[in-house]
Amino acid sequence: MPEGEFFLYELIILVELGRLIDDYYRCNDMNVKEQIQSDIQLLIDAMVIGEQSS
């Protein structure tokens, strides 16, 4: 994958991560918060894997 393309994917992941963190702190439902936390962890894991493969 070209470096510019990887940067774009990483940027999209960071934007989504920011949105999820905002949602997490605004949410009052613990079940939803747990799902958001899981989604956050999945995005972090994806970033780690992406860093390792580059």
Image: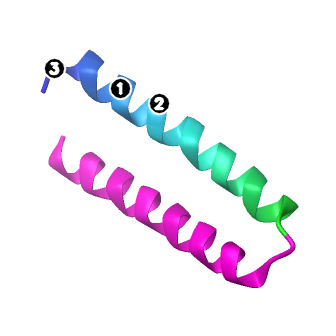
Question: Residue 19 bears which disc, if any?
Answer: none
Q: How far apart are marks 2 and 1 (CA)?
A: 6 Å
Main secondary structure of the magenta stretch:
helix
Location of the N terminus (image quadrant): top left
* Residue tagged 1: 7
Question: Residue 2 bears which disc, if any?
Answer: 3
Residue 16 horizontal/vertical position (percent): 56, 42
Give the camera-side residue of 33 and 8. Answer: 33
| Disc 1 and disc 3 in contact, CB within 8 angstroms | no
Give the mark, 1 or 3, whose residue is nearer the N terminus: 3
Q: Which amino acid does label 1 sit on?
A: Phe
Decide: is 34 above or below 53: below
Q: Distance between the residues labelled 1 and 3?
A: 9 Å
Any magenta on residue 39?
yes
Query: What's the magenta region?
Result: 28-54
Give the mark, 2 or 3, whose residue is nearer the N terminus: 3
| Disc 2 and disc 1 in contact, CB within 8 angstroms | yes
Residue projecting furthest to the left: 1
Q: Which amino acid does label 3 sit on?
A: Pro
Location of the C terminus (image quadrant): top left
Residue 26 horizontal/vertical position (percent): 86, 59
Residue 33: quadrant of the picture: bottom right
* Residue tagged 2: 11
Please give the name of the residue rendered at 44% of the width and 56% of the height, measured from the top-left corner: 43
Q: How far apart are marks 2 and 3 (CA)?
A: 14 Å
